[in-house]
Image: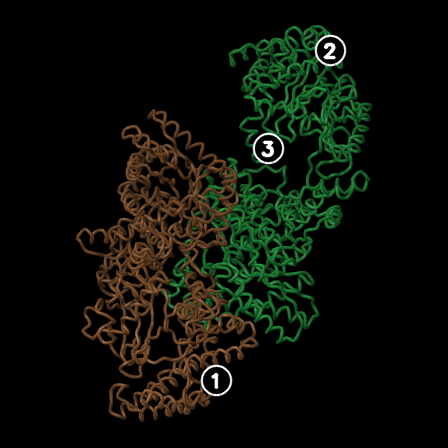
Chain colours: A brown, B green
Amino acid sequence: MAEFVYSFGDGSADGDGSMRVLLGGKGANLAEMTSIGLPVPPGFTLTTDVCKAFYANDRNYPEGLVEEVNAALKLLEERMGKGFGNAENPLLVSVRSGAPASMPGMMDTVLNLGLNDVTIQGVINQSQDPRFAYDSYRRFIQMYSNVVKGMDGNIMEHILEKKKEARGVEQDTDLTAEDLQQLVTDFKNSYRATLGEVFPDDPQEQLWGAIGAVFGSWMNPRAVTYRKLNAIPADWGTAVNVQGMVFGNMGNDCATGVAFTRDPATGANYFYGEYLVNAQGEDVVAGIRTPQPINRDNHQDSDLPSMEEVMPESYAQLDEIRLILEKHYKDMQDIEFTIEKGKLYMLQTRTGKRTAHAAIRVAVEIVQEGLIEEKEAVLRVNPDQLDQLLHPSLDPKAHKQVIAKGLPASPGAASGQVVFSADEAEEQSRLKRKVILVRIETSPEDIHGMHAAQGILTARGGMTSHAAVVARGMGKCCVAGCGDVKIDYEKQQFVTKSGQLIKRGEFITLDGSTGEVILGDIPKIQPEVSGDFATLMTWVDKYRRLKVRTNADTPRDSRVAREFGAEGIGLCRTEHMFFEGDRIQAVREMILADDLAGRKRALDKIMPMQKSDFIGLFREMKGLPVTIRLLDPPLHEFLPQTDDDVCELAHAVGIRFSEVKSHVEHLHEFNPMLGHRGCRLAITYPEVYDMQVRAIMEAACELIKNEGYEIVPEIMIPLIGHVNELKILRENAVEIAEAVIEEYGVKVDYLIGTMIELPRAALTADDIATQAEFFSFGTNDLTQTTYGLSRDDAGHFLPDYIERGVLEEDPFVALDQRGVGQLVKMGFELGRKTRPELKVGICGEHGGEPSSVEFCHRIGLDYVSCSPYRVPIARLAAAHAALKEE
Amino acid sequence: MAEFVYSFGDGSADGDGSMRVLLGGKGANLAEMTSIGLPVPPGFTLTTDVCKAFYANDRNYPEGLVEEVNAALKLLEERMGKGFGNAENPLLVSVRSGAPASMPGMMDTVLNLGLNDVTIQGVINQSQDPRFAYDSYRRFIQMYSNVVKGMDGNIMEHILEKKKEARGVEQDTDLTAEDLQQLVTDFKNSYRATLGEVFPDDPQEQLWGAIGAVFGSWMNPRAVTYRKLNAIPADWGTAVNVQGMVFGNMGNDCATGVAFTRDPATGANYFYGEYLVNAQGEDVVAGIRTPQPINRDNHQDSDLPSMEEVMPESYAQLDEIRLILEKHYKDMQDIEFTIEKGKLYMLQTRTGKRTAHAAIRVAVEIVQEGLIEEKEAVLRVNPDQLDQLLHPSLDPKAHKQVIAKGLPASPGAASGQVVFSADEAEEQSRLKRKVILVRIETSPEDIHGMHAAQGILTARGGMTSHAAVVARGMGKCCVAGCGDVKIDYEKQQFVTKSGQLIKRGEFITLDGSTGEVILGDIPKIQPEVSGDFATLMTWVDKYRRLKVRTNADTPRDSRVAREFGAEGIGLCRTEHMFFEGDRIQAVREMILADDLAGRKRALDKIMPMQKSDFIGLFREMKGLPVTIRLLDPPLHEFLPQTDDDVCELAHAVGIRFSEVKSHVEHLHEFNPMLGHRGCRLAITYPEVYDMQVRAIMEAACELIKNEGYEIVPEIMIPLIGHVNELKILRENAVEIAEAVIEEYGVKVDYLIGTMIELPRAALTADDIATQAEFFSFGTNDLTQTTYGLSRDDAGHFLPDYIERGVLEEDPFVALDQRGVGQLVKMGFELGRKTRPELKVGICGEHGGEPSSVEFCHRIGLDYVSCSPYRVPIARLAAAHAALKEE
């Protein structure tokens, strides 16, 4: 058997469908279709090994390739009953690239290769159609010069237009054989004038030219970029498929078409496709002629005759092939076919791309049809796709003028009038106006405005900036870090990079799944969760091992998350409660207090409110675990920053302006991320955590005592770097907790644990586990410290890093398994070494990202926790991880 | 042999000098002295195991202890020929604590234990001196009530004062036996009134009371704090020494004294000490009577008769013992002795504390005397002590009023008039005035003022803040992070916590070794490096393996470092060059430029200046390796921050104010430490590093070509987090370097390497080593990221952490071996796995801290690099590390 070239045809093939890596997707499927008896024009595939050897060997082909190609060509000639370059009965071929993964940016297709001034006569004689022959010839020259030689396609298009003008016709089809013959000459002249060489007449030279162009295109800048963006290794290489030509354009008994074996938009089980009579494949896609439906099941709006009506026999055969393919591949297929003189040929089959809705419906139905197992169905649905299902999306048919682009920080689509402050957002929303809140960045003080707005647009901050995190938690559309817009609060307007001016009150639309900012109010499609979704999710839950919790700070968020299947709260950020309503006042009093007594007085005001928050959460999550993180952010986040606001606060609490101002300045930090926050605050001011622990324990005791709940509160102490910190704070917490339990006289278990969010905590997790009953990896902060990368500042350069492939992925989106992941694994293993029963999860934003969820499964964590709207994604990803392991 | 009690006396002892851990320092030395035949009053030691058992067993003594003590007591009675509690011939004992390490804060000494109203008669009969007997009795009650029972010492002192008043005398010695007998009664009454119990008459009860007090004092808050501060493990425990009393106060043939076998201040080899006739040990220390010199070799200023003159026989015996002890212990000793009725007793010997000067002189001379080997001498000198030698220090005799305390950021002492700006510092210094620069914090813009000032005081920032690092580099005194002072630039004054107001122009003094800020201009002692120092350092260099380089940015610093023995530059921070003279203008032009062309124009101006900097450095370090770090800080550090300064800059470069302002704002970062800096800048603006690499290589090529130097420049790329960053920047650098080499037509080797200063870099060091020829661990930044701790902000809470023992040491001072060190080790091992010949060093501030240097030696690094003035310390620490390994 040949080493580099795999032939197929006449019902037998050297390769098969499993050899995608060697033969590319297209080549493998052509071999497979041939083997199972489908009508495929014969041909052969140069393997990806040739491509690898080509680049390993300074762009030279491996030894023996020419001989193997010649042998395969000979076999092809035999199978087609034609001769390559033969004057009487010429073999024409197509040359196509075919990589293991779909690869836009590479050389695509050259048809009709083998034509020259000699073989054209054979085609004329055989087809008895000089017009068809010259049309094929001029198309070949066009394609070859453009696709193989990189000549600007407009040059020949222009000559074609001139010719039509000269002949006074409008359509290509109106040109005569003579016109087309003349065009062949004109094209060849143009080729010579532009490229400085004569158009190759020798079919062998044409063939090797096309093969070389395919391999060369593997390193096209566009292909290189695409691979980087899609994490496709450069050393995979591409294959080349050489196949005998069949023609859909030799007359009215010829046709060509594309079809899906089910509806790719809805997943409905009917044959869905389009075809054109007397046309080559490119015509269907090009949109010059309006394609006709293949049957009446779809395209109800088309009054063109369907293939079922026009070519009933071929249609019947195609419909039969449709069933064979689905049975064989056990999935919905995307196919290309050609009918030459009434004979049907299959040119391609591949797994059909589909919407999330369709993916779920097809997966579920195909199980019900007995074609695949549940497990397989679960694996068929891409977790990332689920996002589409859970948020409104822009109507793809709507025209949209994109005026800026930022980070797709929180999915969904939203339109509204632009406002520039949280207060105004709230005000307008009370007047039932829809608004988009536009801020340079958001802070916890903007939460009420974010609630009120339809969507949020920020000029600064990354995928885990405040705006992004909070918006995702709310399930609200957000475009963040949109450096394209310059916001002027004073003038109440923003200007885009391209100079578009948007004033307060103007309508804009955000697409949180793409990061696009669009002018005006664009129509949207509302999400709809089907019964198939519910079916699929029951299978998902059957096969996953990893638990999925949610990050939720309010009863409302908790309810949403439970509906999405959350199995507990993995992270409740208590500081969010500090901002609500009139609490912020008491919080500020506490911060401004001069002494312990003053702080305690202020904390006494906050305590009942925190307690009622926790009662609400515990009620909502009845019976499920709830992890509550004690105060984390630095104190200055709670104080106003502008002089006006400072003045107002001074007035409100009855302290001199200068004193408040001095407090604010004293709390200023150069690197607040690395400053006086988390447990460090509690070492300095233990009374804060004391209050919080009391509120948690009183809430739990009250529900247990009065309502018979089962609650095991999990108290989480953040930002531990050294075991001594946790030791001290744990002792304090236990003392308070036991006191409360004694006061209420009930039995209640509780756990005390910590976030692992500093490299040192992971490195010394064996020490830390002596003081912790659970670990929760805070991978947001852990990524910041491990990478030395501030998520709030990374916007200055990180997008450029990703674009240029310095980093393959934003480490705040997908967990950096090589670096940060190494610490997670180390921390987990060290922790379990000390305490085998240690509960371990992760609560960073990564908890809802599929590749990160898979990582967490693989290393053996107990659960992931993510924002409510990502819970289904995490569940599906967890099931994928478990099933892939099998 | 007994398990818990070790006896000594009559020339034999159960223990010996090597059993310091079990017997405590004092007990071990008493045993040792007894064994070698010195006259030591007999006694016994309760081991530290008793203390451990005591705390392990809820403050109960281990079984059998009482029996063992009784047996030891019996032996002691035999050896002393007296009976404990015996009316005729009573045995009196002293009880002293004695831990393995010196431990202030613990119970110290109770003398004369065993006295009561019965045994006093025996003492009177034997001594024939009722005054002595009652004086001993009242002292015993005073000590017992205060030391054992914790009664306020002032109460009995007050009674004593009253008695003297009543008797119309001034001195204790003027009181008669009757007065003292009365005092005994008064003291006992006061004891009962204060403590609510009767003073114990039973000698056994007294003994167990004292023993219990010693063990109890192990957990005194003061002792606990001291242990934490000095990293002494709590589980070491203390021993208790019970020893037969001998009396220096039984008449004029009695005396007591303390002495050093050599002068502890200078190390000169003569007998140095003080004594008092007819006195107990405490009198020598208490300062009530003026002690007399033991000989005329020292205390030239004293006209009191010396022991050599007054008690020539005892002195001769003591002088002989001095030689025996030095020969035996092979080191300078600190001894206590008592002469009872003409008979000499040794009460204590221990290694004598000494100044740095003395330490070096003693070590060197003792080698020359043939007592110890060079290696031992090297180990005798504490690396930390060397700091004293290299900087001026405050005259210890001067009176000083400390007005505030900050961090001892850079050692030495300095006085000057207070100024509040770098410009004024420079101006005043030009007028030959000495100034102290006082700033809230310093930035690179203050460098010229820091140069001009005698010392620097900052209100914010830690041990590795800008002020601290730069000051240490300059060898200039600095007190940093002094939160005690509130600085008001407007009013040109500062106020201390205690309310002291210091205006511009007033004199203050800084002690950079203690962190004290002192009012006025305090006299100083200038440093002096002796020949002994040079001798010691040649031995040091013989035994160390680790190389010591320096962190230096200027030829001047480099020269200092070479004089101190630096073997190359481990870190040259090129950005410091960016601030000098007129360069800052060009740097700002570069930052403000709109496009590449503009940036290149500005860089072209900087390039010749950088090149001449490098030529200067290479010349100074002729033949030694020089590691140059390319630009590291974020760009905003080079721009002015106040509106006034922005305005000035706008004017200077001819750009509109608003534009400069907007640039400054655009560059603002929330966490600059984790922001757009280091290699990240070079990925965005490769032209900056291109310029720097060209300057380095041209400098090297020029010196090689024109002056025949041998130079292998080491180009260091900072802040690498991912190998791809280094790959890109390495390729750029190689391209430039090769081009320069070709231009000059010379042969030159160069290395390209990186800082390992992010956890991710350490975790993926095997990847990174594929692109690096050397690693230098930047442990300052690595500590910040590993701990999630900003050194600029840590001042808010880190001092409190250390004080309370949450952390044992400031991780910015001593490398955190458990956490950060783990990453250093991992990075080193992974790097060497990929590239066995990888050069590896550290260039953080830790490179000059002894425990960190030892760590670097232990894990196998090639070199450490530290500020010039710490080079000798690092050399000595490196030798210690190597010798300890043997």
Q: Which residue is mark 2?
A: B82
Q: In which quadrant of the rendered image does the N terminus of chain B lie? A: top right
Q: Which sits earlier in the primary sequence, circle 2 or circle 3?
A: 2
Whole-number angstrom distance, CA of label 2 to CA of label 3: 39 Å
The kind of secondary structure element at disc 1 is helix
Residue highlighted by disc 1: A204
Q: Amino acid at mark 1?
A: Gln
In the shown orientation, is residue A94 left or right of residue B210? left
Q: Is residue A272 left or right of residue B510?
A: left
Task: Give the secondary structure at mark 3.
Answer: loop
The image quadrant that residue A242 belongs to is bottom left
Residue at the spot of label 3: B233
Choose top left, top right, bottom left or bottom right for residue B342. Answer: top right
**Image spot of residue A739 (x, y percent):** 38, 27
Q: Chain of mark 3?
A: B
Above or below, A559 against B720 in this view is above
- Toward the left, the furthest residue is A431
Quadrant including the C terminus of chain B: top right
Q: Nearer the viewer, residue A171 or B477?
A: A171
Q: Residues within 10 Å of mark 3 (few under 14, many from 20)?
A: few
For the residue labelled by badge 2, is the local secondary structure a helix, a strand or a loop?
loop
Give residue A575's mark. none
User: Disc 2 or disc 1, which is closer to the eye?
Assistant: 1
